[in-house]
Amino acid sequence: MLILNKYKSWFYTLMVLLIMYLLMLFLKIDIGIIFSDLHYVGDLLNEMFPPNYKVVWENNVVFNSIIQTICMAYLGTLIGGILGFIFSIIASNNIFNNKYISVITKWFLSFIRVIPSLIIVLIFVIAVGPGPFAGVLTIIISTIGTLGKLFTESIENLDPTSANSLRAIGGNKLQIFKFSIWPEFLPSFISNLLYCFDINMRTAVALGIFGGGGIGYKLFLAMRVLHYKDAIALITCIIVLLLIIENLSNYLRHKILGS
C-alpha cells in the first residue's frame, strides 16, 4: 500500500502525458513542422514590418471603425446588462417566489450562454446584414446570458436578514427590493458590468472578422488582400485600445466601489 501511494503521483503524471500524446495523434499534430517551416514565419514578418501606420493616421475610416468598436461594446454591454438584470430578478428565488418561472428563466439564460457568439453573429448578419448592428445584437445576447447568471447568483447569495426584517413589518416586494436588496447588490452590479464591458471589447473586435463591423472587419479586409503592413498597424491599434479600455475599466471599478 505504501509503495502504491509512493508512486501514485508518477502514475498520474504518466497518464496525463499519455493522454496528451494520444490527443496529438488524433489531431495529427506534427511538432516538427514548426521547425521545418519556420522560415515561412520569417517571410511573413518581413512582409509585416515596418507597419504602415499611415493607414491609421491618414484614413478616417479606420478611426471611425475604432469608434464603432467602442460603441458596439458599450451599447451591447449596457442593453444586455439591463436585460440580464431583469431576467436575474425573475430567476432569483428570493425575489420572484415562483419555482417554475425561476427554473424556466435559469434554463433560458443557460441556453443563451452556451450558444457561441460566432454562431449568433452569423445569424444576425443574415438577418440584418453585415455591420455594427449585427455586432451589437450579438453582444446583447451573449451579455444577457453571462450577466443574467452572475446577477442571479449575486442576488440569491445576499444576506436575507434585512429583507426578512422589512417583510416582517409589512414591506411589499418593491420596498424590499428598493431598500434591502438593491443597495447590497449595487456593488456587484457595477463590478460585473464594467468587467463584462472589458470582455465585450475583445468580443467586438473578433465579431468584426465575421461581419460584425468595427476595427475587426478592417483587419479582416487587410489580411484578405494581403496588406500585411496595414494589418500589423491595425493589430497594434487594437492592442493599445484594449489596454486603455482595460485600465480605464479597472480605474472606474476602484473609483466607484472605493476598493
Image: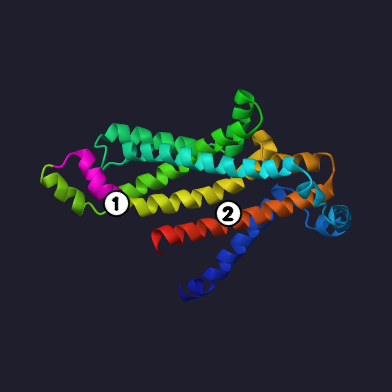
Q: Is residue 92 above or below residue 9?
A: above
Q: Say left or right for 256 vs 72.
A: left
Residue 177 within the magenta-colored segment of the rendering? yes
Q: Amino acid at mark 1?
A: Pro
Give, as a single range, the part of the protein colored magenta: 171-182
**In front: 241, or 127?**
241
List x then y, in percent, for residue 196.
50, 48
At mark 1, the secondary structure is: helix
Q: Amino acid at mark 2?
A: Ile
- The extreme top residue here reads 127
Q: Say left or right for 223 vs 173.
A: right
Q: Is residue 79 above or below residue 194?
A: above
List x then y, in percent, for residue 222.
79, 42
Determine the residue positioned at 27% across, 48% down. Answer: 181
Q: Say left or right for 37 vs 201.
A: right
**In front: 157, or 62?**
62
Q: Say left or right for 47 vs 80.
A: right
Task: Choose top left, top right, bottom left or bottom right for residue 255.
Answer: bottom left
Determine the residue positioned at 32% across, 39% down. Answer: 89
Label 1 belongs to which residue? Answer: 183
Task: Choose top left, top right, bottom left or bottom right for residue 99.
Answer: top left
Determine the residue positioned at 88% across, 56% down. Answer: 46
Mark 1: few, some, or many residues within 10 Å (few <14, many ≥20)?
few
Q: Is residue 111 above or below residue 194?
A: above
Q: Which mark is residue 245?
A: 2
For marks 1 and 2, the one nearer the N-term is 1
Residue 115 within the magenta-colored segment of the rendering? no
At mark 2, the secondary structure is: helix
